[in-house]
Amino acid sequence: MQIREMVASDIGDVAELFQRSGGPTLEATETPDVLARCLSRCPGLSQVAVESGQTVGAVIISEGLKARVDYLAVDSSMRRHGIGTKLVRTGLRRLFHEPNAAKTVDVSILESNTLAHIFWLMFGSGVILDSGSSRRVTFTLHLGDQNWLLHPDW
């Protein structure tokens, strides 16, 4: 399996992965052109996992004053093999080593997504926010507190 930087030509495969995996749903306004702009503004942060020519995992990370993990999905047949962890660590490691980049990262997930809670607790703590009918948990990661960023083998 190969983890590599996501490029604009990956967007169709990533959208198909999201559908196939029962993962996140792209908003109607998140067109391929909008996602391509995100990739060009934040090069190297978003990653894909490719196995035998098929996209089996993807993370989309954007950056402003804070960074944000917008989407993370792994093909359901490939879960529990560390692919999500590798994708997130690769993107956040790139962010961490970028001069003058944001060092705080927010991740927002549905309160009911227990598996995502367990996953993101590896990286930081979460706070429940009530945003109308869909209660969400926001995990804030402080990159300076992430020891694994200093060790390339972790």
Image (cartoon, rainbow, N blue to C red):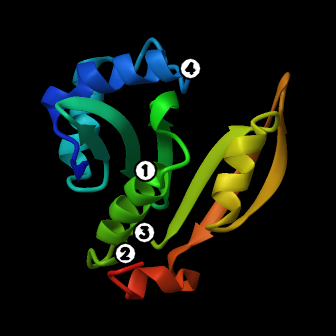
Who's the residue at 73% across and 54% down the image?
118
Q: Is residue 64 above or below residue 89?
A: above
For marks 4 and 3 on the same chain, the one whose residue lies earlier in the sequence: 4
Which residue in the structure is indicated by mark 1?
A: 83
Q: Mark 1, mark 3: which one is toward the viewer?
A: 1
User: Few, some or many C-alpha atoms within 10 Å of disc 2 (few <14, some 14-19, many ≥20)?
Assistant: some
User: Considering the image in quadrants, where does the C terminus appear?
Assistant: bottom left
x, y percent for residue 76: 52, 29
For marks 1 and 3 on the same chain, the one whose residue lies earlier in the sequence: 1
Which residue in the structure is indicated by mark 3?
A: 102
Q: Is residue 74 above or below residue 34?
A: below
How many numbered marks does the figure carry? 4
User: What's the amino acid at mark 1?
Assistant: Ile
Which residue in the structure is indicated by mark 4?
A: 22
Q: CA distance from mark 2 to mark 4?
A: 30 Å
Determine the image quadrant of residue 45: bottom left
For marks 3 and 2 on the same chain, the one whose residue lies earlier in the sequence: 2
Q: Is label 2 in contact with label 1 (beta carbons under 8 Å)?
A: no
Using the rendered image of the protein, determine whether residue 26 is visible from the camera's viewpoint: no
* Mark number, residue 18: none
For marks 2 and 1 on the same chain, the one whose residue lies earlier in the sequence: 1
Q: CA distance from mark 1 to mark 3?
A: 24 Å
For marks 1 and 4 on the same chain, the one whose residue lies earlier in the sequence: 4
Q: Secondary structure at mark 4?
A: loop
Which residue in the structure is indicated by mark 2?
A: 96
Who's the residue at 48% across and 55% down the image?
82
